[in-house]
Image (spheres, grey):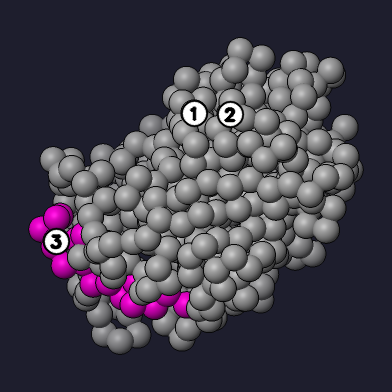
Amino acid sequence: MVITLLAALSLLQAPSPGRVTFEYDVRIPMRDGVMLSADVYRPSTPGPVPVILVRTPYDNGVAGQVAAGKKWAARGYAYVVQDVRGRGESDGIFYPLVTEAKDGYDTIEWLARQPWSTGRVGMMGGSYLGWVQVYAAGLNPPGLKAIIPTVTPPDPDRNFPIQFGAYGPANLSWLAAISGKTMQDISQHDLRAVYSALPLYEADRLLGRTLQPWRDWLDHPTHDAYWEAQAYQKLLLGSTIPMFHVSGWYDDVMVGTTENFVNLKGHPNQFMLIGPWGHHVNDNRKIGAIDFGPHAIINLDSLHQRWFDRWLKDTPNGAERDAPVRIFRMGDGRWLDEQEWPLARTRYVKFYLSSRGRANSRFGDGVLDTLPPAAAASDTWRADPMNPFPFLTDDAFSQIGGPDDYRKPEERKDVVVYTTRALTRPMNVCGPLQVTLFAASSAKDADWATKVIAVRPDGFALRLNDGIARARFRQGRDKEVPLEPGRVERYEIDNWATCIRLGSGWRLRLEVASHAFPKFDRNMQTGGPIGKEATGVVADQTVYHDRERASYLLVPITR
């Protein structure tokens, strides 16, 4: 497939210069009478053309969109960039997500009826711009023929802004940046101080704002009607629209891409691409200190054109016969063409936690091993919400964490660390990462924050991915159940996925801590209302790993 695809891409013509018709602030009516503003770029030639729609809360007139409009017009498309409701030049009041499905549907159908349109509409864009695509696709507008949802979050209480009951403080800075009609400058604020404020419910005041969505989120800690009204993934199951899902192994909302692709298994024309990227896909071969090599950056623009040419112009380029999954394997820098996700050839191996009771820090005696534990043992640490275990990240909301080195945080005593022996031969770890944990707390609530690490021979502790379980939601997201102090509970913790080739001398590692701050808000461990307390309690946390309570990391190993 690689040779075929590369050959096909070589046939794509670079956009030729030509006249472009510009129409700014085109008013598009919604079903409730609100008018949304769009900028339209289309060829100055007779005859209708297919339409590519981008819907954004980040200002539709930025330089990048103008350049994209001219490029796609030169390729024979109308390129339409719309400010979502309440943002930019669009009327109405902005509130994340609540009107995006209907507004997207109405916009698509309006565009399909225009005299310069063939009636075929595609959508593209990343993050919130990916969200608006899948919300609209769930309603199956007749004019929508193909989408490219990129770095798209799942349902909003599945990951962003809440992940298994834990809130992301960086969402405050995102809300502040889009709190006006146009983008707000938050660069002069001390964002770490904002994230650290207590009670977190009122931290928006440090940004000079009252951010109603933030407070609404915290007022709805369980999955209730508020969140159900903003969900899209169930509706998406009824969509028949071809979708090209794109993400990166270090995209902090990657789970939306993998879940949507897996959920649509069996639907025709679903494709997924995951590269060695963060939330900004395909813009750099490096993230932090890690260089993913010369093949990390691809001609993604040509893939976009190939996709739209096939579904919006009926160009017989064979895009529908491409391998449905294309993923980058870190470690050896190879792109793999696959038929499914997770990979059918995966062998899932349990790596059990064990120690002699002193697994605290990377200097402890914690071990990961494929042999089940024989002795009754456990590891204990003290968790203090006033001094939470850190998650390494910049403060900007646009990228939460990456392939960071956790050697320094792992020197702390409030983390337990379990590491394999050095590999004697290479091992491919490619697929979902799942942790089963038996644990107890002296408190009424606790967070179990896990992190999967690949340790290089030089000691660099490379984060692969991580997850969290907030104990009060252990019986489901629809209710809060306080812990019985000291009672051992079983937790299944999704650490999403990775794909990496570990060479000889590398080791796998699992961290378990009680916080991952500031990726997630601090659990105050009182069992009180989330985000509304100014003080917490110190708790004694215990992880068990004996024969009856065997905690383990499930590792996907491929040939």
The residue located at (66%, 73%) in the rendering is 237
- The one of 456 and 180 positioned closer to us in this rendering: 456
The kind of residue tagged 3 is Arg
The residue located at (60%, 53%) in the rendering is 542
What residue is pinned by disc 3?
Answer: 205
The residue located at (31%, 42%) in the rendering is 396
Residue 212: in magenta span:
yes
Indicate the position of residue 57 as horizontal and vertical percent values.
30, 58
The image quadrant where one finds the N terminus is: top right
Q: Earlier in the sequence, mark 3 or mark 1?
A: 3
Query: Magenta-highlighted stretch: main secondary structure?
Result: helix
Residue 364 appears in view: yes
The image quadrant where one finds the C terminus is: top right
- The one of 439 and 463 positioned closer to us in this rendering: 439
Q: Could you give the CA–CA distance between mark 2 and mark 3, rounded to whole angstroms? A: 39 Å
Magenta region, residue range: 203-223
Whether pointer 2 and pointer 1 mark residues with C-beta atoms closer than 8 Å, the reply is: yes
Q: Earlier in the sequence, mark 2 or mark 1?
A: 2
Indicate the position of residue 494 as horizontal and vertical percent values.
64, 55
Indicate the position of residue 212 as horizontal and vertical percent values.
23, 72
The kind of residue tagged 1 is Glu
Graded by Cα atoms within 10 Å as few (under 14), some (14 to 19) or many (20 or more), the crowding at tag 1 reads some
The residue located at (58%, 47%) in the rendering is 380
Indicate the position of residue 127 as horizontal and vertical percent values.
44, 52
Residue 411: numbered disc = 1
What residue is pinned by disc 2?
Answer: 362
* Callout 2: SS: loop
Tell me: residue 214, above or below residue 194. Answer: below
Q: Is residue 429 left or right of residue 463?
A: right
